[in-house]
Amino acid sequence: MPVPADLDLLGLDAALSPTDREIRDAVRRFATARVLPHVAEWFEAGTLPRDLAPELGKLGVFGMHLEGYGCPGASALQYGLACLELEAVDSGLRSLVSVQGSLAMYAIHAYGSEEQKQEWLPRMAAGEAIGCFGLTEPDSGSDPGSMRTRARRDGADWVLDGTKMWITNGGFADVAVVWARAEEGVRGFVVPRGTPGFTTRNIERKLSLRASVTSELILDGVRLPADAMLPGARGLAGPLGCLSEARYGIVWGALGAARTCWEAARDHSLTREQFGRPIAAFQLTQAKLVDGAVEWNKGALLALHLAGLKDAGKLTPEQISLGKLNNVREALEICRTARTILGASGITLDYPVLRHMNNLESVLTYEGTSEVHTLVLGQALTGHAAFR
């Protein structure tokens, strides 16, 4: 039997520089050796060890696309490749890195004071401190403008009251970037763990992103000094700018989950025999594998193009919406179809497919639902804002 072709039918690997490949391969080796042997167990237990953070910091993936303050200053393409390799093992691992670097660190890097940057970014880049990003609320998800968390001045201080929900890393974060409505508009605040009135509660009984810490943030009269506010962010443009950073990483990360599931299904189809032959020899199985490979390659082409735009400083929010909408939607379909090829074996943790399927159900929703990204593109195409 001939050796099966790699999923990269278009030879996209040739578009990468030697440095790009070196970074990609280093992340793949770490994720495969350090996380993959344990991730099914962590998923089943509903946990993610915090002691991974210093190792990820040493690997250089925290804030890897940011400049200075101990950050590697990698290209957008290299960051995307890292996200792909992390999510090829589990979405929870990529979420830890995305929230740390593209949300919490990016917010401080883009909008923080020099003192805030010096205090937090080197420690976060090294994995010595973990951050989270408090925007979503119990009644405010796709419409962050309706947030109820309030920030009021009391003398020279700020006092925050409110609740944030579905916050990745929240339960073990050392610092939270919290967005609240003040008299002059939405502002961001750096809230260290241990601040009186600031508590977290982990969300249990999840059926998705189980190898990830997801939490509720509770702010009850949290008093902060004036310099806790991010001076460079005013209004919703601040948090939405951070979300664009995180969404870009998801464009790549979803490809990693899809690759793992496709490869598991292809490999299974070559060894599973029915009616006297491998199921890979049947037309319907081949059609499923071909459809998945075609969509994966189209998604990879899209991700490469967006990386080029981002590195050139030309990437727009609408283009990121297109990437997230397409790549997550198609990745989920690839994983679902892979499960049908695996049959009953596909529902167990002995194989990665249902774990990735369940994770992608969350990825489909967070950092903007498919519906929201559809309407963002609808507005770009028609000029009409259907969600306002």
Image: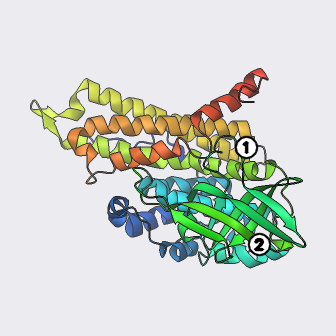
The image quarter in which residue 289 lies: top left
The residue closer to the viewer here, 132 or 2, is 132
User: Which class describes the residues within 10 Å of circle 2: few (<14), some (14-19), or many (20+)?
Assistant: many
| Mark carried by residue 108 | none
Which residue is found at the position 33% from the left and 51% from the top? 352
Q: Is residue 78 above or below residue 276?
A: below
Residue 48 x/y as whole percent: 44, 66
Q: How many marks?
A: 2
Hey, what amino acid is under mark 2?
A: Arg
Residue 62 x/y as whole percent: 61, 67
The residue under label 2 is 223
- 121 with respect to 173 (left or right): right
Q: Is residue 288 above or below residue 232?
A: above
The image's colour scheme reads rainbow
Residue 31 x/y as whole percent: 44, 64
The residue closer to the viewer here, 284 or 238, is 238
Q: Considering only order in the chain, which callout, 1 or 2, is on the residue closer to the N terminus?
A: 1
Which residue is found at the position 41% from the left and 65% from the top? 47
* Contact check, label 2 and label 1, Cβ < 8 Å: no
On the rendered image, what quadrant is the C terminus found in?
Answer: top right
Hey, what amino acid is under mark 1?
A: Ser
Which residue is found at the position 71% from the left and 73% from the top? 121
The residue under label 1 is 146
Distance from the alpha carbon under mark 2 to that under mark 1: 23 Å
Secondary structure, mark 2, is: strand
Residue 129 x/y as whole percent: 62, 76
- 7 with respect to 339 (left or right): right
The furthest residue to the top = 382
